[in-house]
Every structure is written in C-alpha cells, then in structure tokens.
Image (cartoon, rainbow, N blue to C red):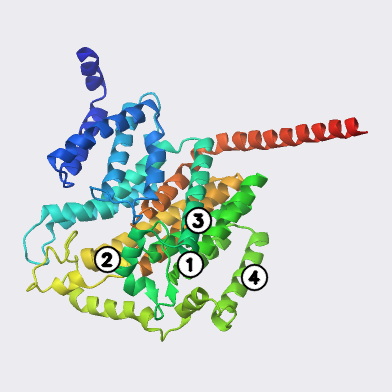
Amino acid sequence: MPNSISTYSTENRGRVLLLFLLFLLAIYQFVTAGFTAFAVVCVLPFVVLFIYATFRWRMFAFWSLFVINYFLQMKDIKLPVPTSLPNEMFELIMLAVAIIDARQDPRFERAGNIMLFAIMIWVSFCLLEILNDSCGLGINPAAWFNGFRLLAIQLVWISLVFSIYVASPKTLMTLLKLWAILSLFTVFWTYKQVYWGMTTAEKIWMETRGRTTHIINGGTLIRYFSTFSDAANYGCNAAATAVAFFIIGITNKIKWAKIFFLLSSVAVIWGMFQSGTRTGIFCLGIGLVVYIFLSKSVRIAVPFSIIFGIFGFLLVFTTIGNGNQQIRRMRSAFNKEDASVNVRDINKEAIKKYIQDAPWGIGLGMSPENVPANNKFRKLSAIPPDSEYVFIWVHTGPIGVTIFSICMVLIFLGGCRVVLFKLKEPSLIGIGAGYCCAFVAINFGGYANQVLFQYPNGVLFFGGMAVVYILPYIEPEWAAYENMRLAQIAEKKRLRAEKKKKIEKLKN
C-alpha cells in the first residue's frame, strides 16, 4: 500500500498537490468555523460517513449539495456552524474525488471556458483586496478571508463542480426535475404559510427582524418568504426560476416534461406574487425579453412580445386586480413617488459621498463589528446596502463593482454564444436559453436587492451557467437520449392502444 501511494504521488504530482491544497483549505475552514472540541468529536463520524458515501456513490454529494441549499435558511433549521460551511465542504470533497478520478474520467478540460476565465479575473481582484487598508486599521486577514470566501472563491467551486459532475443527458434532466420539485416544495410551503399559518420559528422572526419589512400597510399585508431568508430573496429567485421553467417547457419535445415545467412555472409565479417583491416583476420581464433575442424565432418572438406588452400595459396603466393587495404592491413598483421605492436612492446618495475617498472600497469582510465608532468609514459600513451590487460597491469600491459587472457580462455573453452558435438541438437550446435568461433575471434582482449570493441562488444560477458551457459536450448523447425517451413513450402508447383493443374485443 505505501508503495502504491508513493507511485501515484510520483506519477500525478500536480493532482496530488492540488488535492493537498484543497484538503488544507477544508481543514482551515473547519477549524475557523467556531467549532468547540466537543462539536468536532461529534461531527467527525458524520464527515467520515459522508466522504465514504461520496466515494462509494459519486453523485451523492452533488445531489446532497443541491437539495440542502434549498433548506439552509429555513427559520426552523438552526445550524451550529456558518451557513456557508456545508456548501464549501461538499464542493471541496467533490473536487477532491474528481481529482482522484481524473485519470479514469477526465472532465476538468470542460471547465476551461469563458466563465471560469471571468471568475478568475474577479478572484484575482479580490485577492488584491487583502492589501486594502482604506479604513486605516491595518490589514485584517480574517475579515478579508471571510469576504473572499463568500464573494469570490465560492464561484470557483460552483463552476468547477457543475462543469465536472453534470456530464450526461440523464444527469441534466434529473437536475432540472429536482430543481422543479424543490421549487414546487417552496410553493407548497408558501401556501402553508398563507393558509395554514407559520411555524413558531417563522412567527418569531416575523415579529422581530422581519416586522418592518414583511408586515406592511398597517399590518394588512404580509410578505411571505417560504423556505428562503426573506421575501426579497424568495421573490427574485421565483421570478428567475419561473423564466427558466417556462422556456424549458415550451422548447421540450417530450409532452409530459413540457406540461410539468410549464405548470411549475405558473405555480412559482404565484409564489412570487405572495412574496410581495416588486423587483420580481422586473426580473420576470427582463428574463423573458432576453429570450425574445435568444430564441432566433419570429414565431416565438411575436407572441412573446404581444403577451408581455399586454401584461405590462395592464400592470402600469390600469387598476385591474387592485382588489388584491399583493398586486397593488407589485404595481407600486412603477410609482416614482413611492417612499419605500425611493429609500434605496437615498442610501446610494449617502454612500456616494463616502466612497469618493475609498476607490477600492472599505475592504472585504469589513463590517460595523470591524470598524470602530470613531472611524471615518463607520457609517459606510453600517448603511444598509439594499442590493448585492451596492454591497460590492461599498466593499470593493467603484473599481471592484466595475470589474464584477464586466465579469458577469462576460459570463452571460459567453453563455449566449453557446446557445446561439454551438447548439443545434432545439430542446437543448431551450435549456441553455432558460439558464441564461434566469442568470440575467437574478442579476437584475441583485441590482435591487441583496440576493445574488444568498442561498440557494449561487448554486442554482451560477451552477446553471456552468451547465450552459458544457452543453456542447453532451449534445451528441442528448439527441440519442431524447430519441430513446420519445421511442419509449411511443411504445407505451402502442401497448396501451393494443390493450384497449383487446378489452373491446372481449366485451364484444
């Protein structure tokens, strides 16, 4: 055994070094997560079992990661560790397994694309941010690393994991169906909150942290948040998800899949309205507008434009549906004099005054806990950023938010290039377009609300864009897979028809 390990290490020095670095990073995150010695002893057996299950069943960790993301921020679930830790540990373990399997099943070359290139530009900038001392407090590696993990390095893990593990048409379809099932669960949970009531933990949150933003109009309007951190996160996620399901549904060749995804889209839109998140309307709209261009079809573009135009006209220029408070709240998004809509602009103006003296921002991870009360940038660290892009603007400055925006545009345009020029199968084009439009929608949501890096959005939409880039690799198999499924459905119909004929003969 020692000889075999020595031989493997000699022949695969690069992979062994990368594996060792990933292991060290995982241990560092584990140690700095705030575990007590007793907690470490209790958790270790589960970690060992999880690693064994991942090696035994290669996709176990991937599906676990995807499912757990949807429930990390439920009010009834209290983790003894930072919320980000399960994600990072899962992703690092999966990458370690992929490195070990690289010789038998090489897939790392699929990850070398425009998306990873754009992410590495952003990561490189965030690495330089460790030298940022705008607050004059000296370099704070711990605070920087916390911000670096959440804003940059997690994008690398997500891109690599989805590029490597979504490797076949069957896996892709399972991923889409699982996404739809989890989204339908969030709709069910919204229905439960609306008509059956909230759990004790949800009520406590609503009466404390969520009271001013989720109980409005004198207590007559409740903004529901389902399994998410808050209603804004839920509404923007629902809008982007509905766009993706609608596009996947109308382009799918399999009838049951078409119906399933279209019904899922309708259900998720209902949930979006229950969130009372006005940005959701714009996320939904911009996602559908982008698809008009990606569809390359007049047959799709014309009815899309007509339906979207009618919907927009009814919402902006009429009072239809005003009997419903959620619709009235959505309609208020178009009212320029609405106080709650304008509060973001007021905050931005206040930030703009301070940020002039901090072109690199106040630094990654710098919060009111890190910045003393007498510091010039204390107020800047405490002003509610209201949106993900404003948060990045505050912490990395005009330079950082510009670089981040360019990287997001590169990722999107690279995905559009794949959809427009590299794919030929209509249903696969629909999946790629669905993910691209959802990515635009959630980024628009991130411009108005702090949702882009909230759970489960990172895995869903950045992971989805990583899937877009690997679609050309699985397209040859996709055509065969889709034809096989259509043949199976046709055979079942034929067998049912024959059975029906036999029964009719027996009756006669």
Residue at screen point 29% across, 33% down:
96
Foreground residue among 398 and 175? 175
- Sequence-earlier tag: 2 or 3: 3
Measured Cα–Cα span from mark 4 to mark 2 = 37 Å
Residue holding disc 4: 306
In this view, the mark in front (3 or 4) = 3
Asked whether the residues under the numbered discs 1 and 3 touch, taking CB atoms below 8 Å apart as contact, a structural biologist would say no
The numbered dot on residue 391 is 2
The residues bearing labels 1 and 4 have C-alpha atoms spaced at a distance of 26 Å
Residue 129, image x, y percentages: 17, 57
The residue at the point 44 percent across, 75 percent down is 221
* Residue 108: percent from left, percent from top: 37, 35
Q: Single out the mark in the foreground, 1 or 4.
A: 1
> Residue beneath label 1, please?
274
Q: State the residue position of label 3.
A: 188
Name the residue at 19% across, 65% down.
360
- Report helix, strand or loop for mark 3: helix
Question: Which callout, 1 or 3, points to the residue nearer the camera?
Answer: 3
Locate residue 4, reporting x and y percent: 24, 14
Decide if residue 253 is in sight here: no
Q: Look at the numbered disc 2 and give the secondary structure of its residue.
A: helix
Q: Kindly identify the amino acid type of the residue bearing the numbered disc 3.
A: Phe
